[in-house]
Image (cartoon, rainbow, N blue to C red):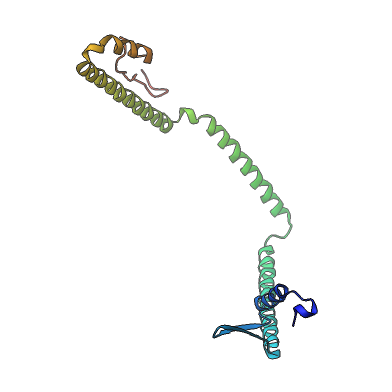
Amino acid sequence: MGPKKGVISQSVKDVVQSLVDDDLVLKDKIGSSIYFWSLPSTAGNQLRNVSRKLESDLHASKKRYAELVEQCNALKKGREESDDREEALSELKSVELNHKELKNELAQYADNDPATFETMKKGIEVAYSAANRWTDNIFTLRQWCANNFPQAKEQLEHLYQEAGITDDFDYLEPPNVAPVGSPT
């Protein structure tokens, strides 16, 4: 009937589907057919449910607002403007400023902190240990190459020179580092 009146069937499907999506029209598949229907009481029930939900949300929001106002008033008690309060606030600001200055001064001396020094010392020991481990690996590799490729000795020596492995290449000895302020 729609195409005879100039209505495109796809637009009818779209409108019906949007009504189903909005819960204004119900649908069921019975056999191979899909049936659509809407009852006046269904729309009324939906509106009443939405109205109840909104009213309960409004009631909960008003209750929460009243609680917050009461809490705000309770927090204001004891904070009335007075000379004692102003004096206490100025003292608090002064103490906070002093704390910040002392914290900045402490940060300047962080490099001389014994705990920081010990951490740095342990880091140096780990770095020296790793460097010596790699040196040992290089010596092992050189020995293996010399044993397995005796005919390429000159080429290997040239390769070592290019890589920076010279004749004075050896293990590292960690320096004795004394803490700052202690006798050496």
The residue lying at 74 percent from left, 74 percent from top is 8
**Quadrant into which the C terminus falls:** top left
Left or right of 114 on screen, residue 150: left
Figure quadrant of residue 38: bottom right
The residue lying at 36 percent from left, 26 percent from top is 127
Q: Residue 166: x percent and y percent?
A: 33, 11
Residue at the right extreme, as displayed: 5
Please say if 27 is above or below 126.
Answer: below
Please say if 101 is above or below 7.
Answer: above
Q: Residue 126: x percent and y percent?
A: 34, 29
Please say if 172 is above or below 34.
Answer: above
**Quadrant into which the N terminus falls:** bottom right
The residue lying at 56 percent from left, 83 percent from top is 32
Left or right of 3 on screen, residue 140: left
Q: Is residue 104 or residue 53 the one in the foreground?
A: 53
Q: Is residue 134 or residue 67 the one in the foreground?
A: 134
Q: Is residue 52 or residue 143 the one in the foreground?
A: 143
Figure quadrant of residue 47: bottom right
Residue at the left extreme, as displayed: 147
Q: Residue 52: x percent and y percent?
A: 67, 83
Q: Residue 87: x percent and y percent?
A: 69, 49
Figure quadrant of residue 22: bottom right
The residue lying at 36 percent from left, 21 percent from top is 177
